[in-house]
Image: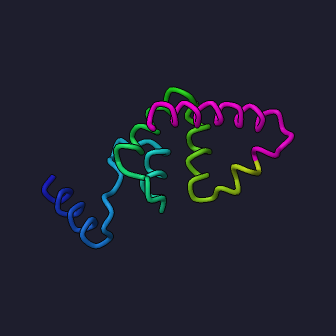
C-alpha cells in the first residue's frame, strides 16, 4: 500500500495529473485523460455514472474512445448500419442526460 501511495504521488508530481481511480470506468478514465479544460474528477465521475445507467458495457467502451478520436463519433453518426443508428440514438440520450444531470 505504501508503494502504491508513493507511486501515485510521484506520478502526480511528474505529470501534474491525478490518475483515474482504480475502479473508474472507461468513460471516466477517458474524460480524466482528455485535454478538455472542464474535465475535472467530479464531472468525470458524474458522466460515468450517467453512462452506467444509459449505455451497456460495449457501448461505454466504444464511446470512451471518442474522447481521443471524435471523428469516430461522426463516422457512427453518419453510418447507415442499423447497429450504428441504435448506438447513436442511445449516445444522444446519454449526452442529454449527462448534460441535465452533471451540468
The image quarter containing residue 16 is bottom left
- Left or right, residue 6 beside residue 32: left
Q: Tell me: 22 left or right of 89.
A: left
Residue 43, x across and y down, in percent: 40, 43
The spot of residue 75 in percent (x, y) is: 77, 51
- Residue at the outermost top position: 53
Please provide the residue range marked out in magenta.
76-103
Q: Quadrant of residue 59?
A: top right
Q: Who's the residue at 43% across and 53% down the image?
A: 38
Q: In front here: 89 or 19?
A: 89
Q: Main secondary structure of the magenta part?
A: helix
The number of numbered badges drawn on the structure is 0
Colouring chosen for the image of the structure: rainbow
Compared with 41, 12 (above or below) is below
On whether residue 88 falls in the magenta region, the answer is yes
Name the quadrant of the C terminus. top left
Residue 32 on image: x %, y %? 42, 54
Residue placed at 46% from the left, 31% from the top? 101
Q: Does residue 17 appear to the left or right of 88 in the view shown?
A: left
**Which residue is located at x 50 percent, y 31 percent?**
100
Q: Residue furthest left?
A: 2
Out of 8 and 89, give the one closest to the viewer: 89
Q: Where 49 sits versus 2, above or below?
A: above
- Residue ranking furthest to the bottom: 14
Q: Residue at x 41, y 37 (%)?
A: 46
Amino acid at each position: 500500500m505504501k508503494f502504491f501511495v508513493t507511486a501515485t504521488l510521484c506520478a502526480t508530481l511528474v505529470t501534474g495529473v491525478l490518475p483515474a481511480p482504480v475502479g473508474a470506468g472507461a468513460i471516466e478514465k477517458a474524460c480524466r485523460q482528455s485535454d478538455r479544460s472542464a474535465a475535472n474528477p467530479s464531472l468525470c465521475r458524474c458522466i460515468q455514472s450517467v453512462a452506467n445507467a444509459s449505455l451497456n458495457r460495449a457501448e461505454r467502451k466504444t464511446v470512451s474512445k471518442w474522447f481521443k478520436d471524435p471523428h469516430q463519433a461522426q463516422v457512427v453518426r453518419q453510418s447507415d448500419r442499423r447497429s450504428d443508428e441504435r448506438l447513436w440514438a442511445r449516445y444522444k440520450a446519454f449526452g442529454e442526460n449527462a448534460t441535465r444531470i452533471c451540468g
